[in-house]
Image (spheres, rainbow, N blue to C red):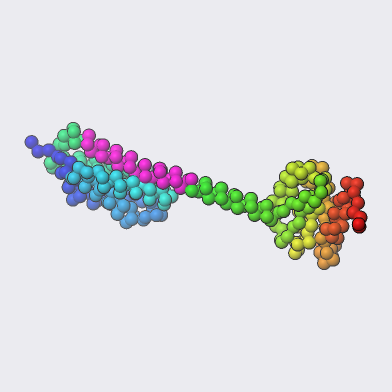
Amino acid sequence: MMSTSLGDLGNYIKEHSDSSLRELAEQIYDESAAYRSNQGKEGIYQTFRTSLLLICDALITGSTENIVSRLSNAGADRAQEGFLIEDVLLGIRLLRELVWDQLERCMVTNGPMSLVDVRILERLLHLLSRTMMLGYSQTFQQTIKAVEKQAAEIEAQRYTIREIGTPILPLYPGVIALPLVGAIDSYRATQVLERLLEEISAKQADIVIIDITGVPVVDTGVANYLLQTARAAQLIGAQVVLVGIGAEIAQTLVQLGVNLSQLKVHATLQDGIRYALGQLGFEIRAL
């Protein structure tokens, strides 16, 4: 009585599976956006043809060494290309179905396959699934860790930039200074406010001197940021003293109709420090 061996099945698939592979590629192309965008229809066909030939070689030779190494790499490649697990599982399922379909067709010609060989075939297909998924999951986890590490590094860099870009200087117990340099936009203004409020609480500051000597342009937007900062500082018990307003900036603020009456304003940092110490009951005198 004729029967189908594993080697017979491997040779049969090599010779008769091309049209089935084309249908598989069409289905994956239609159902998987990741395969469609990364490989295209012909690329999908070639990818699964390679996998199928590895299965055939394993069936013919009885060795799984090549299939394990190659399919593990294939799983890793899918993870690096950004495939979802659903995409990988779709490909595995359709490839397994193709092999079982080819077995049914082969047995029509060659006769039935022994139960022992059917179990070997199932173990081989299970190995295919496990190897692909293991390669995918390991690389996926490595990618997640790399992204998390990169995110932590970016956050650390942001913190460093924030510290450098918003230096808070303790001048005297209860008095801190914030020298601002460069343009101020909404993002930086938010950072300045957050950091300043943190330092007011941490250092229990009563007076905050904000020096805008190094700010090139003070318009209504910047003035509003300063007023918001002053109001927020007052809510936690600190007074804001604004220094560094030159003649040109003062003229601009007047023309814009900006009202800084809520702030104590002094021309220079020295004047601001003198005022702050005076508020605390101290006085600067020449020796």
Classify residue 158 as left or right of residue 251. Answer: left
Give coordinates of residue 106: x percent, y percent. Answer: 17, 42
The answer to whether residue 33 shows anywhere in this view is: no
Above or below residue 270? Residue 248 is below
Between 106 and 188, the one lying in front of the other is 188
Give coordinates of residue 203: x percent, y percent. Answer: 76, 44
The answer to whether residue 127 shows anywhere in this view is: yes
The structure residue drawn at horizontal position 90% and vertical position 54%, both measured from the top left corner, is: 284
The structure residue drawn at horizontal position 69% and vertical position 56%, both measured from the top left corner, is: 165
Give coordinates of residue 276: x percent, y percent. Answer: 86, 51
- In the figure, residue 260 lies in which quadrant? bottom right
Find the magenta span and give its range.
119-145
Give coordinates of residue 157: x percent, y percent. Answer: 60, 53
The structure residue drawn at horizontal position 39% and vertical position 54%, both measured from the top left corner, is: 38
Residue 136: in magenta span = yes
Above or below residue 24? Residue 184 is below
Residue 17: in magenta span = no
What type of secondary structure mainly makes up the magenta span? Answer: helix
Between 286 and 39, the one lying in front of the other is 286
